Image (cartoon, helix red, strand yellow):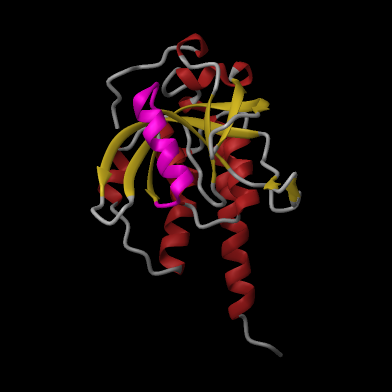
Amino acid sequence: MSMNHAYSGLDELPGAFPIFPLAGALLLPRGELPLNIFEDRYLAMVDDALRGHRIVGMIQPDPEAGAGLGAPVLFPVGCAGRITQFAESGDGRYLITLTGIARFKIAEELAGTTPYRQCRPDFSPFTTDFSPRVGEDQVDRDGVLRTLRDFAETNHLQVDWKSINSAPNEALVNALSMMSPCSPKEKQALLEARDLKRRADVLVAITEIELARGKNASAPLH
């Protein structure tokens, strides 16, 4: 999804913004993440974001770290997104879409009076996120498509191959990563991959492991 405001660098982003911890949710640069917002604190978060810069940081709780000071401990890396679609459901919910801008590390979680969490981000490790399609030439597209075909056939999935085949490598790898039914830890590995090639390699490896598990589970016992 195209944004009315194109972010070309970290100087164009706010020095602090709300963070939305959600296990299993992965947002990547220029990807689209639909969200169903219903908790009061996150309804307030969306209201405040819409009154300001419209930026929300998606981040996952770390399931192995437990809770700190009554709140879940978060993974150190998330992705900032801009609210590009907004609708009211009529029953108290908001339906929004975030479009990914760039990944960030939490430099500091801020103490404040808002019911939702906020952080000061550090975008400096991920400056290439601001430039679309960086590293596409290094992606093993054939390997990604081959693994996708195997996964789709094994799980009897209908795939729009026309759209898949016409998608640029960045859109293909990031969309498949966001849709992948993998664990939160694996989602985090996809998020933190240093570049697009590495993300594609991680995606293929995760999918191949899942396919192998399925074959082992269905193998007859002797």
| Region of the chain picked out in magenta, as a range | 38-54
Task: Give yes or no for residue 167 being in the magenta stretch.
Answer: no
Extreme front residue here? 113
**Residue shown at 63% from the left, 86% from the top:** 220
Q: Is residue 201 above or below residue 36?
A: above
Instruction: List x then y, in percent, for residue 127.
Output: 55, 16
Residue 53 among those drawn in magenta:
yes
In the image: residue 78, left or right of residue 71: left
Q: Quadrant of residue 44?
A: top left
Which residue, as the protein is rendered here, is positioned at the far bottom? 222
Q: Nearer the viewer, residue 147 or 91?
A: 91
Quarter of the image where one finds residue 43: top left
Position of the N terminus by quadrant: top left
* Residue at x-position 47% and y-position 26%: 137
Figure quadrant of the C terminus: bottom right
Q: Residue at x 54, y 52 (%)?
A: 24
Prevailing secondary structure class for the magenta stretch in the rendered image = helix
Residue 178 against residue 98 in the figure, above or below: below
Q: Is residue 110 above or below residue 127?
A: below
Q: Residue at x 60, y 27 (%)?
A: 119
Query: Furthest-top residue in view?
Result: 11
Q: Which x, y percent locates residue 205?
A: 61, 50
* Side of 211 relative to 74 (left or right): left
